[in-house]
Amino acid sequence: MTKSSYSTIAEVLQWAYSQLASSSDTAHVDAEVLLLHCLNKPKSFIYTWPEKALSVQQFRAFNNMVLKRQQGVPVAHIIGEREFWSLPFIVNESTLIPRPDTEILVETALNLTLSPHAKVLDLGTGTGAIALSLASERPDWKVTAIDKVDEAVELAKANRQNLNLPQVEILQSDWFSAVKDRDFDLIVSNPPYIDAEDEHLNLGDVRFEPQSALTAGEHGYADLFHIAEHAREHLVHGGYLLLEHGFEQAIKVREKLIELGYQQVATVRDFGSNDRCTLGHWLS
């Protein structure tokens, strides 16, 4: 790509579409997101000013970004950001990129009848997307977010500062180890739940994400079952456990929660009508 061949917004977008068509199922969206990042403009700008010429610096930056996307690098890693729950989250290679499907977990949590000052725990917080989204909607909730990976903890803290949500507590912890003497009204988690042998781990954006944040033993159920078992020790009477899982795991997760004594166990579907998270009520 040379500046003499392509110079306007309309021209560089058309070029990017053609370059990304064979490597991305979302070529148009990818190209627009990358260009908007280079221009530091809202989406309306590229439709309002299609004949606007890019500066040399903008042109070179966009070219480099398109080349990275051709190589399979996730858009979120290229621009260092992903929107989740209408909030901008800093992302990097230390943890998972927040997925739109996980917003159903946030929505389900917000729809629960909890105390205005409910104590909430987010296990394996990663970017902090779930915990910080909940805190943005319920500023009086006492939200604690934990992750085992130091780099993920630092990333979540950076997002806490960037989103101005200082009330959220963020800790380094191997699951419940840092909160072993504490109880919560709600425990949420989007833990690793993919089978290590799953062929999809070699496809798409997940190739660039840490396997430790994706895969779990027992065909993907190990962490889900561990959390379900030990959450009982940290839930108040009437508290809730809410777990995200794979769309084919709902039946076994429900069976496990019922076996462990949870009541009113139910699965919620995501925006694509796939079973996405399961809720259990602790009344013992």
Image (cartoon, helix red, strand yellow):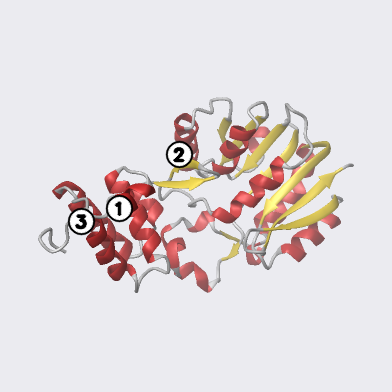
Kindly report the distance in space between the C-alpha atoms of the residues bearing marks 1 and 3. 11 Å
Comparing 150 with 252, the one in front is 252
User: How many neighbours does mark 1 have within 10 angstroms: few (below 14), some (14-19), or many (20 or more)?
Assistant: many
Q: Judge from the rendering whether residue 186 lies leftward or rightward of residue 199; answer left or right.
A: right
Label 2 sits on residue: 155
Q: Marks 2 and 1: which is nearer the front?
A: 1
Please say if 230 is above or below 167: below
Please say if 18 is above or below 140: below
Element carrying mark 3: loop
Could you say where residue 132 lies in the image, as x and y percent from the top left?
Answer: 57, 36
Tell me the quadrant of the picture where the N terminus can be found: bottom left
Label 1 sits on residue: 35
Q: Marks 1 and 3: which is nearer the front?
A: 3
Given the image, on which type of amino acid does mark 1 rest?
A: Leu
Label 3 sits on residue: 8
Residue for point 79% across, 59% down: 254
Element carrying mark 2: helix
